[in-house]
Image (tube, grey):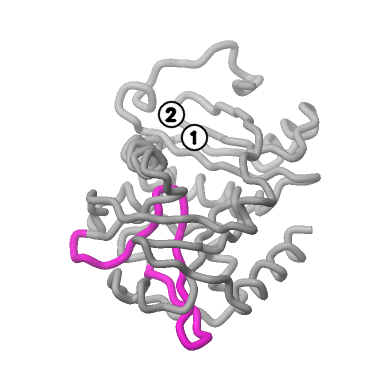
Amino acid sequence: MDYIDSKQDRIKLDKGLFFGKGLFETILVKEKAVFLEEHINRINNSCKILNIEKYVEYNDVLNFIEKNNIKNKALKITLTDKNIIYSTRDIQYKSEDYKRGFSICLSSVLRNSTSMLVYVKSTCYIENIVEKNKGRNLGFDEIIFLNEKGYIAEGATSNIFFIKNNKIFTPKVKCGILNGIVRQWVVDNFIVEEGEYKIEDLLMSDAIFVTNSIVGIMKVCEIEGKKFNSHDKIEEIINCYKTYIK
C-alpha cells in the first residue's frame, strides 16, 4: 500500500529521483509508532548533510498514521527535495525467527568510512539490497560489511553487537556505520564498549546479536559457519527492549 503526501497530487521529479538525493526512515508501528521522535529527528538532521531544503513534521506523521489507522506495520517515510512519500508494508519477522536467530555471512564489498553517505539513511541503498539478496540466495538472513581498514562496520540492514566475558561490544560510528535508532537505545541503556574490531573478534565472542528498527533485537545463531547459542545478556536486553516499547 503506497501513499504520497496529501499536500501533493503527484510525485514530482527532482534530484531525489534522478540522482538518489533523498533520505528515508522505516518506523515500527505497533499500537503506536515506536521511536517516532528519534526517527524524525534523524531524517531532519540528515537533510542538512545532503542540503535538502525540506523536513518532516512530527504532527503530520502522527496524523497520517491515525487517519489511515496504521497498526502492526512498518511505515516508511521517503524524503526528497520536492516529495514526502509514505508507504507501509507488513512486518515479516515471526516468532520462529527470534527462536532460531539470524545466520550471517560476510560481504566482499567494503564500507567506505570516509563517505558521508554511510552516516545517513540515504535512498542510495541499492548496494545494501543487492548484497543482502546475495546472502539470502546463499541461505543467510543478513550480510555484514567490513570497512576499508578491515574493521567490522555494519549489516546490510542492521547494526551488530557481540558479547565477550559478559561485556557488550559494538563498532563505533566512525567505522562507517549508520547509527541505528535501536543501536543507540542499547548504547544508552547498557554499558557498551564502542571500538574497532576485526572479524576474529566476532568469531571468538560468546554471543552476537543485531538490531534494527523493525526486527528490534535479534540473536545470531551462525556467522561464517560458526554456531552460536543464545546468551543471558541478550535475553536481558531483549526483555528490557520489549518492556520499553510497550
Residue at the (69%, 37%) spot, across then down: 73
Expressed as whole percent of the image width and height from the top left, the position of residue 49 reads 37, 47
Numbered badge on residue 54? 1
Mark 1, Cα crowd under 10 Å, few <14 / some 14-19 / many 20+, is some
Q: Is residue 91 left or right of residue 148?
A: right
Residue at the (60%, 21%) spot, across then down: 4
Which residue lies most toward the bottom here? 165
Q: Which residue is mark 2?
A: 81
Viewport quadrant of the N terminus? top right
Numbered badge on residue 126? none
Residue at the (63%, 30%) spot, across then down: 88
The question of residue 141 being in magenta is answered with no
Which residue lies most toward the top here? 9
Q: Secondary structure at mark 1?
A: loop
Q: Amino acid at mark 2?
A: Asp
Q: Amino acid at mark 1?
A: Lys
Mark 2 or 1, nearer chain start? 1
Q: Is residue 29 left or right of residue 187?
A: right
Front residue (pair 182, 100): 100
Q: Where are the magenta residues, as a range?
A: 148-172
The question of residue 170 being in magenta is answered with yes
- Vertical order, 155 against 16 (above or below): below
Q: Is residue 47 left or right of residue 3?
A: left
Front residue (pair 151, 131): 131
